[in-house]
Amino acid sequence: MEKTFIMIKPDGVRRGLMGEIIGRIERKGFKITKAKLFKPNVELVENHYMEHREKDFFNELVNFIAEDLVMAMKVEGEAVIEVMRLMIGHRDFKVASPGTIRGDFANTITQNIIHGSDSLESAKRELNLWFEEF
Ligand code: CMP
């Protein structure tokens, strides 16, 4: 079964959206097979967002994620990577459709509630990084 890495970002945890988001994942029929609620260190977050290290928002992004609790999850199901990306919605809250998690709850570009792996390759890399898998 396909697996993906999902993270509820600190703004999602702080705003009390864990239940709402987990509910959406479960109602869709996907299985959460691992979860941990913790404050990740800067090194882990920098590694996770490696592809953005040259961007001018990199430090802001890393500080935001490493400053508070995140809910890291392994989610399994058929085509879960693509379907979770659809359920999450566009990265930019102004473009995200109503009905998607970001469309319904995000209101800034950096603090956009949730992250989901964007490919099979990144799902493997991110699950390995956050759960020491593979
Ligand atoms: P995510 O989909 O997790 O991947 C990269 C993250 O960088 C993105 O969500 C946002 O949290 C953040 N991000 C993307 N674009 C910008 C931007 N222009 N300014 C600040 N943060 C951004």
Image: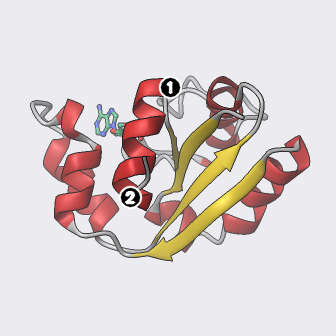
Count residues near mark 1 (Cα–Cα under 10 Å), then give few for <14, some for 14-19, many for 20+.
some
Q: Are marks 1 and 2 in contact (CB under 8 Å)?
A: no
Residue that lies at the very extreme toward the front in this rendered image: 134
Give the image quadrant in which the ligand numbered 1 is located. Answer: top left
- What residue sits right under mark 1 in the picture? 120
Question: Left or right: where does residue 130 sit relative to residue 77?
Answer: left
Residue beneath the point at 62% across and 63% down: 34
**Quadrant hosting residue 97:** top right
Q: Is there any visible trace of residue 119 in the rendered image?
A: no
Q: Nearer the viewer, mark 1 or mark 2?
A: 2
Residue in the foreground of this view, choosing between 104 and 128: 128
Amino acid marked by disc 1:
Leu
**Quadrant hosting residue 110:** top left
Residue beneath the point at 14% across and 31% down: 55
Residue in the foreground of this view, choosing between 128 and 88: 128
In the picture shown, does residue 18 fall above or below 7? below
Count residues near mark 2 (Cα–Cα under 10 Å), then give few for <14, some for 14-19, many for 20+.
few
Amino acid marked by disc 2:
Glu
Earlier residue among tags 1 and 2 = 1
Disc 1 is placed on an element classified as helix
Question: Left or right: where does residue 84 sit relative to residue 57?
Answer: right
- What residue sits right under mark 2 in the picture? 132
- Tell me the distance, in whole angstroms, between the alpha carbons under discs 1 and 2: 16 Å
Quarter of the N terminus within the rendering: top right
Residue in the foreground of this view, choosing between 67 and 76: 76
Residue beneath the point at 45% across and 48% down: 127
Locate residue 8, reporting x and y percent: 54, 57
Locate residue 76, reporting x and y percent: 70, 43
